[in-house]
Image (cartoon, helix red, strand yellow):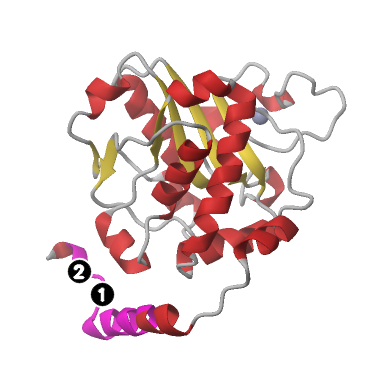
Amino acid sequence: MDLMAPYSWKQIRRHIRRYNMLCLGRSLPAAEPWIRSQLIGVRGPWCHRCGVTLHEASDLVNRCHACLDAATPWNELLRLGSYTPAFAGLVAGLKYRKWWELAGPLGERLGHVVRVELGASAAREAIWTSIPMPPWRCWRRGLDHASMLGDAAARAAGGSTTRVLKRWWGGPQAGASRARRLQATKSGWRVATGGAKQVCGRHVVVVDDVLTTGRTMSLACRMLLGLGALRITVAVLAVTEPNRRSNGPTVLRSEH
Ligand SMILES: [Zn+2]
């Protein structure tokens, strides 16, 4: 069992204890008012290519200056907000503390943004999917947050989710150095049974929690384009602003 190799029995036992403790004794503030209070100030116009917040009045075309003539593997990027510390608290609660109650309201809000931006019928008829999570990571965290967000978002937009891509392994992203994130490769990614058939010639909406370097999302989108996807819309809860990224602009701009 190569996958288990990085974990000692002591660590596994600790995870099980933590899981039980969280399930039995956690205290979650009421999800809805909490989300509402944390979302104040994170909305605003954003670049529909890289996702950064637009501050200048002249940015009327939904593009930042860096993206005016840049190409991305997706046609547009829709987001709920900027990745502020308050927003980060929400995402961390969902991802690492198993506060699954946050997935529904956050996903619904994201689905609403997609419906408004794409139009009700385009959002309903699109194929909705989410960035896949390796099974061992899903087991360790106790939930697949991206898939839960995708389900809630698709439901809010009148569509339904399909599993197109699978991922067998892949190192955890949070806390990883920028260099390590950029090393992410296609190895470990697979197309789910029937995935190619579903995506071919269709408009695909890909849901994830946070876009940081965009590397994972680029990889997924390029695979979807390879399967014949006609148009790709990326829908994420939040986008990390360039000044919060460790080193300059996102990889998308230099790569495409
Ligand atoms: Zn941009």
Give the magenta part as a residue range: 3-19
Magenta-colored stretch includes residue 18: yes
- In terms of depth relative to the viewer, which is nearer, 76 or 1? 76
Which residue is disc 2 drawn over? 4
Label 1 SS? loop
Is 170 located above or below residue 98 in the figure? above
- In terms of depth relative to the viewer, which is nearer, 236 or 73? 236
Horizontal and vertical percent position of residue 130: 40, 40
Residue drawn at the location 73% of the way across and 38% of the way down: 53
Look at the magenta stretch and give its main secondary structure: helix
Kindly identify the amino acid type of the residue bearing the numbered disc 1.
Tyr
- In terms of depth relative to the viewer, which is nearer, 222 or 24? 24
Sort mark 2 into few (<14), some (14-19) or many (20+) by Cα contacts within 10 Å.
few
Q: Is residue 256 visible?
A: no
Is 224 located above or below residue 248 in the figure? above
Judge: label 1 CB < 8 Å from ligand 1. no
Is 73 located above or below residue 172 in the figure? above
Q: Mark 2 and mark 1 in contact (Cβ < 8 Å)?
A: yes
Quarter assignment of residue 231: top left
Residue drawn at the location 77% of the way across and 38% of the way down: 44
Is 87 located above or below residue 112 in the figure? below
Which residue is disc 1 drawn over? 7
Horizontal and vertical percent position of residue 52: 68, 37
